[in-house]
Image (spheres, helix red, strand yellow):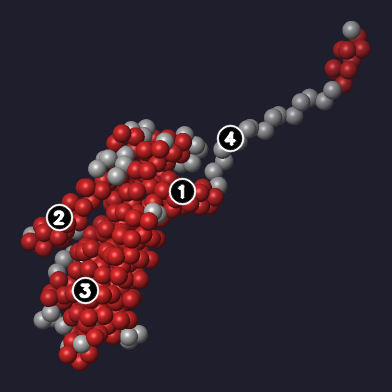
Amino acid sequence: MSTTTASASNRSPAAPRAPLLLGRVSWWRSALALMRLSWVRTVTPVLLLSVSALVLLPMLFALVFASRGALSGDPVPFLLQRFDSLVFALATPIIALLLGTSAFGAEADDGTLLYIVTTTTPRWWVVLVRVLFATLGTALLSAIAVTGTSVIAVGWHDPDRMTRAFVAASAFGGATYAALFTLLSLLTRRALVGGLVYVLFWEGILSTTFPAIHYLSVRQWMLAIARALTTASATVSASAGAATAQSGPSARIALVFAVVLIIATVVVGGRALRRPRLSRIGT
């Protein structure tokens, strides 16, 4: 007994145990994992065919324009109209809609989303990475559509800095549309239908009929950015494309609205994932 007591008294006091760190988040690794998962869930043969058609459509018009040579006339009004009607009004929003709504919908159907939200990865980070994924894809494909159309129509010459202006505006629009449609996919199971209604009805019909709606139209925000970066609208005031580019909110207002929308998407989307109602998430 005494031997046991002595040996116990000779022991040094136990050092305080370090707190156990459970699930420390690696932002870079989690972002890469979410990006890969988004790619697997989103990129399908049907989607590739759809986005390819949207990217190639304005280039086909440019081929017709270039084939007529001098009979085609001034290329600036042509490019303004094609960039507005085929890229800003069609390719950019539809591509963002497909990329922004597919991942969450597929994960809600197969149960992957339930696993993601039970990890230690912050919910707002999941939403932000998904917005970034849709933004990068939309910006890249829109830039290809704008650049390819311009090169086919006028070569590598960039009249009035139009190509650079519309590439930057399409990247801005890609981020804004991606945030809008990602949030929509988290709030409703009919995100794809709702996004099409917004693009075709709100922006395609109402926004062109009622000027006040320009301030709530992502397409008009994109045109505001393009107008601020190019002098084409001042040199071709008689063309329909320039008339479209001269209306709507200013670039500063467009930037403020876009930032507010992206922040709202991250905040509201993160809260929606805290208690995911999987029956309401999807395409």
Of the residues under marks 4 and 1, which one precedes in the sequence?
Answer: 4
Q: Nearer the viewer, mark 4 or mark 3?
A: 3
Rendered-image quadrant of the N terminus? top right
Q: Secondary structure at mark 1?
A: helix
What is the x, y in percent for residue 279? 31, 34
Q: Nearer the viewer, mark 3 or mark 2?
A: 3
Q: Mark number for residue 37? A: 1
Q: How many marks?
A: 4
What is the x, y in percent for residue 71? 17, 90
**As shown in the figure, which amino acid type bears the numbered disc 4?**
Leu
Q: How would you rate the neighbour count of disc 3 (Cα within 10 Å): few for under 14, some for 14-19, many for 20 or more?
A: many
Q: Mark number for residue 202? A: 2
Q: CA distance from mark 1 to mark 3?
A: 34 Å
Q: Secondary structure at mark 4?
A: loop
Q: Which residue is mark 3?
A: 82
Of the residues under marks 1 and 3, which one precedes in the sequence?
Answer: 1
Q: CA distance from mark 4 to mark 1?
A: 23 Å
The residue at 39%/54% (across/down) is 44
Q: Secondary structure at mark 2?
A: helix
The residue at 20%/56% (across/down) is 199
Q: Is residue 97 left or right of residue 120?
A: left
**As shown in the figure, which amino acid type bears the numbered disc 1?**
Leu
Res 169 → quadrant: bottom left
- Residue 43 vs residue 224, the one in the foreground: 43
Of the residues under marks 3 and 2, which one precedes in the sequence?
Answer: 3
* One can see residue 230 in this view: no
Res 159 → quadrant: bottom left
Work out whether 193 lies above or below 16: below
Work out whether 129 lies above or below 245: above
